[in-house]
Image: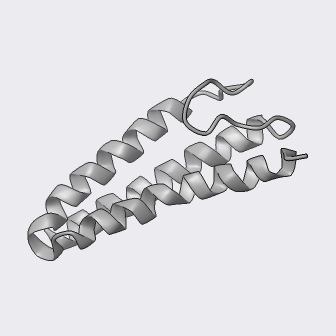
Amino acid sequence: MFTWGLSLLFLAAVSGTLSMARLIAANPDSPLPMWQGRPQRLPQFTIILRGLSGGLGVFGVFLLWSEIGFWSVLLLVVALGIPIALNIRHNRRFEA
């Protein structure tokens, strides 16, 4: 189950990063909302990719929990933190 759990966490990181990259590419001239709100332009499938990212991440933690315990939650934070870091980097361009 260890390999499956790591694979799911990797896929969660990839789908979350892909979703954020599509969102940033569609909104190069406007800041993106961090937690709430809607961006000016929302490309197709970005919401599906975000949901897939969260679901795969949580399921990966469930598979890894018996093997490495709490460290699996830390891996989830890292996997889902990558898109958040991309959002922060994108929004810093618009600070006055």
> Whole-percent x and y of residue 75?
35, 67
> Whole-percent x and y of residue 1?
13, 68
Give the colour scheme shown. Answer: one colour
Residue sitting at 15 percent across and 61 percent down?
A: 63
- Please give left or right for residue 75 compared with residue 59 in the image: right
Name the residue furthest right: 96
Front residue (pair 62, 70): 70
Q: 92 above or below 23? A: below
Q: 90 above or below 49? A: below
Name the residue furthest left: 66
Q: 42 above or below 63? A: above
Front residue (pair 10, 79): 79
- Please give left or right for residue 18 compared with residue 64 in the image: right
> Whole-percent x and y of residue 24?
72, 43
Residue sitting at 82 percent across and 35 percent down?
A: 30
- Please give left or right for residue 7 compared with residue 84 in the image: left
Q: Quadrant of residue 51?
A: top left
Residue sitting at 23 percent across and 59 percent down?
A: 61
Residue sitting at 79 percent across and 52 percent down?
A: 92
Q: How many marks?
A: 0
Name the residue furthest bottom: 68
Q: Quadrant of residue 36?
A: top right
> Whole-percent x and y of residue 78?
44, 65
Q: 74 above or below 42? A: below
